[in-house]
Image (cartoon, rainbow, N blue to C red):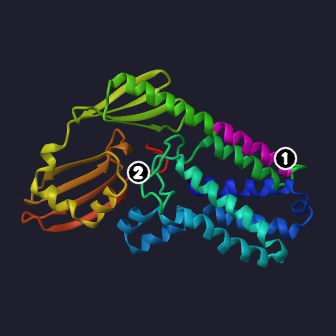
């Protein structure tokens, strides 16, 4: 999920802690849990510092070790203890660490519901896991937790613990509903295309709106959107076999940016274009993240006429409010 969503989740989680009498009665303990929950709800994304090493390092490792099983145990110790000490609630350090652990786990679980994926089972499995059920920013969840957290901050709620608990119960029901609905839509797409090699359905910003990519048994890719019960085809891309055989594609495959993309991409697609100066532009993408204008997530490699790499880039080329919402 996005940063705002994670922070709101941390705030309402700390609000729910007020269901414990000792938290509700101790302002210092309440402040320690709020501090730890806010930091813990964002801590796995501290791997954004990898951007300093370059975009390929960030793409390669984002949502990797910092979201893994060992990290679930390390973050609470790094955050919970200092937070309890900072607010003079050291005798409750274990309780603060427990709520921090809950914040970190929820961060990883919500990232799991997105389409980008997360290596949450490392070191036992390196596979990127994703449920494709929720957008990176889910408007319903932002409103729900924004109201709960905002009301607590303004002193509107006489019992913030009960209000935040209700928000989390509604969140659990909503997340399960979206996950089940996604599975139903995937089955619809599979029935439409017979026996495809792969099907990916990503959520749109609004309910009952999805976009899909299907790799047929012939190797070609079918792209489209789903609005309610309507399935609207958008484009069909041929199997990129000829492109992969070109020398410029083979050279580009060895670059750091393309290797970073290949580490987690599920539906790799590549195309190349000859340039006026005699060189080539090779573009790699993961077709799961398509839109009607271009490929918003891509690795681009420019080569000269002797196939020397001149420039390479990787990253997102879209605004936050533009699809896909991953």
- Using the rendered view, name the quadrant where residue 202 is placed: top left
Residue 207 seen by the camera: no
> Measuring 7% from the left and 63% from the top, which residue is drawn there?
305
The location of residue 113, given as percent across then percent down, is: 54, 46
Q: Is residue 293 above or below residue 116?
A: above
The location of residue 141, given as percent across then percent down, is: 65, 44
Q: Residues within 10 Å of mark 1 (few under 14, many from 20)?
A: some
> Measuring 43% from the left and 53% from the top, which residue is drawn there?
128
> Measuring 61% from the left and 62% from the top, which residue is drawn there?
42
In terms of depth relative to the viewer, which is nearer, 282 or 243? 243
Q: Residues within 10 Å of mark 2 (few under 14, many from 20)?
A: some
The location of residue 88, given as percent across then percent down, is: 83, 78
Residue 236 among magenta residues: no
Residue 161 among magenta residues: yes
Segment tinted magenta in the rendering: 160-174
The location of residue 179, given as percent across then percent down, is: 56, 37
Secondary structure found at label 1? helix
**What residue would you read off at disc 1?**
162
**What residue would you read off at disc 2?**
318
- Going from N to C along the chain, the mark reached first, 2 or 1, is 1
């Amino acid at each position: 999920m996005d940063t705002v969503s994670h922070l709101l989740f941390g705030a309402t989680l700390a609000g729910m802690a007020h269901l414990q009498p000792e938290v509700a009665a101790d302002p210092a303990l309440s402040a320690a849990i709020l501090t730890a929950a806010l930091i813990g709800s964002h801590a796995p994304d501290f791997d954004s510092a990898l951007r300093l090493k370059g975009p390929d390092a960030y793409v390669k490792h984002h949502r990797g070790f910092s979201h893994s099983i060992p990290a679930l145990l390390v973050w609470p110790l790094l955050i919970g203890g200092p937070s309890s000490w900072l607010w003079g609630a050291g005798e409750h350090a274990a309780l603060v660490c427990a709520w921090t652990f809950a914040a970190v786990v929820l961060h990883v679980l919500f990232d799991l519901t997105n389409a980008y994926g997360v290596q949450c089972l490392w070191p036992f499995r390196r596979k990127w896991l994703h449920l494709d059920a929720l957008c990176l920013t889910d408007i319903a969840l932002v409103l729900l937790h924004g109201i709960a957290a905002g009301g607590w901050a303004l002193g509107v709620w006489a019992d913030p613990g009960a209000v935040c608990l209700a928000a989390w119960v509604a969140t659990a029901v909503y997340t399960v509903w979206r996950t089940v609905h996604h599975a139903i839509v995937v089955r619809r797409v599979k029935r439409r295309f017979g026996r495809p090699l792969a099907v990916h359905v990503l959520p749109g910003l609004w309910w009952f709106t999805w976009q899909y990519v299907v790799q047929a048994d012939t190797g070609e890719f079918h792209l489209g959107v789903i609005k309610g019960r309507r399935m609207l085809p958008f484009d069909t891309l041929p199997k990129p076999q000829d492109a992969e055989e070109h020398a410029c594609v083979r050279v580009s495959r060895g670059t750091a940016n393309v290797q970073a993309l290949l580490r987690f991409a599920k539906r790799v697609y590549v195309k190349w274009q000859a340039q006026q100066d005699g060189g080539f532009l090779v573009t790699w993408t993961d077709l799961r993240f398509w839109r009607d204008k271009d490929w918003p997530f891509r690795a681009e490699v420019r080569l000269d006429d002797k196939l020397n790499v001149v420039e390479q880039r990787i990253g997102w080329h879209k605004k936050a409010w533009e699809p896909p919402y991953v």
